Amino acid sequence: MTRERIKKVLPACVLLAAAVVAGAFLLRWAHMRFLQQAYPCGYAEIVTREARRNGLDPALVYAVIRAESNFNPEAESRAGAIGLMQLTPDTFEWLRRRERDGGAFSESDLRRPDVNIRYGCRFLALLMKKYGVRRTALCAYNAGMGTVNAWLKDAAVSKDGRNLDRIPYAETRGYADAVEENYRQYKQLYHI
């Protein structure tokens, strides 16, 4: 190739390289924006405060909220769980009595993000402390402590009494998988 030919082609090559780099940057930016919309950090002030107050990783709280209600404070399950972190009125009442924090809250207050996240974080922290294994605690959050306690006593389900080698309920298995994936995404996206 002659020098004249190189001089003519070089600017086009530089422009093409710049376009490729810019295109890759734009694709990465668009992908990150898409993921941030798919994995929002709603109610950040409340989540941060309550996670810190309860010794929880905020990314785990966001992961649970996303799996439970997808950030809809009006969400209600078939089982009667309410709000962002999907607490049942019975669990809410049990936590209030246990914490001696009766307050003037009623069942309808579970739709309030501040109340729901406050008690949801308390419950999640209690489960994390009780079980010491995140996946086991998440299973208890979904299926209940009584159910998980029985699973942990069953050698066909748990060899060590702490970890669930097999999760008998498909719904709970799917829930734990979803929260773990959400958690991974939140950690990766937001470095929290």
Image (tube, grey):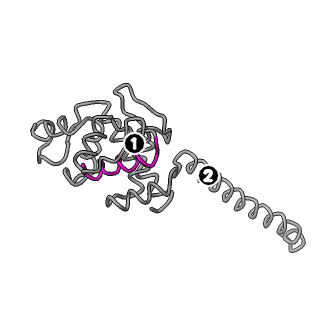
In what element is the residue under mark 2? helix
The residue at 19%/50% (across/down) is 131
Q: Position of residue 3 (x, y in %)?
A: 86, 74
The amino acid marked with disc number 1 is Met
Note whether 143 is above or below 127 in the view shown: above
In the displayed structure, would residue 70 be above or below residue 55?
above
Residue 156 placement (x, y as % from top left): 12, 36
- 81, 155: nearer the viewer: 81
Instruction: Indicate yes or no whether the magenta region holds residue 132.
Output: no
Local crowd at mark 1 within 10 Å, few (<14), some, or many (≥20)? many
Q: Residues within 10 Å of mark 2 (few under 14, many from 20)?
A: few
In the image, is residue 115 part of the stretch drawn in magenta?
yes
Q: Secondary structure at mark 1?
A: loop
What number is the disc on residue 85?
1
* Left or right side of 116 for 124: left
Magenta region's main secondary structure? helix
Quarter where residue 56 is shown: bottom left
Q: Which mark is residue 33?
A: 2
Residue furthest front in the image: 104
Residue at image coords 20%, 39%: 145
Q: Residue 72 bears which disc, if any?
A: none
In-front residue for pair 117/132: 117
Inspect the image, locate mark 2, and give the three-letter code of the amino acid beneath it: Arg
**What stretch of residues is rendered in magenta?**
112-127
Relative height, residue 94 to residue 20 (above, below): above
Tag 1 and tag 2, C-beta contact below 8 Å: no
In this rendering, the label closer to the viewer, 1 or 2: 1
Q: Is residue 160 left or right of residue 77?
A: left
Provide residue 57's location: percent of width, then percent of height.
Answer: 37, 58
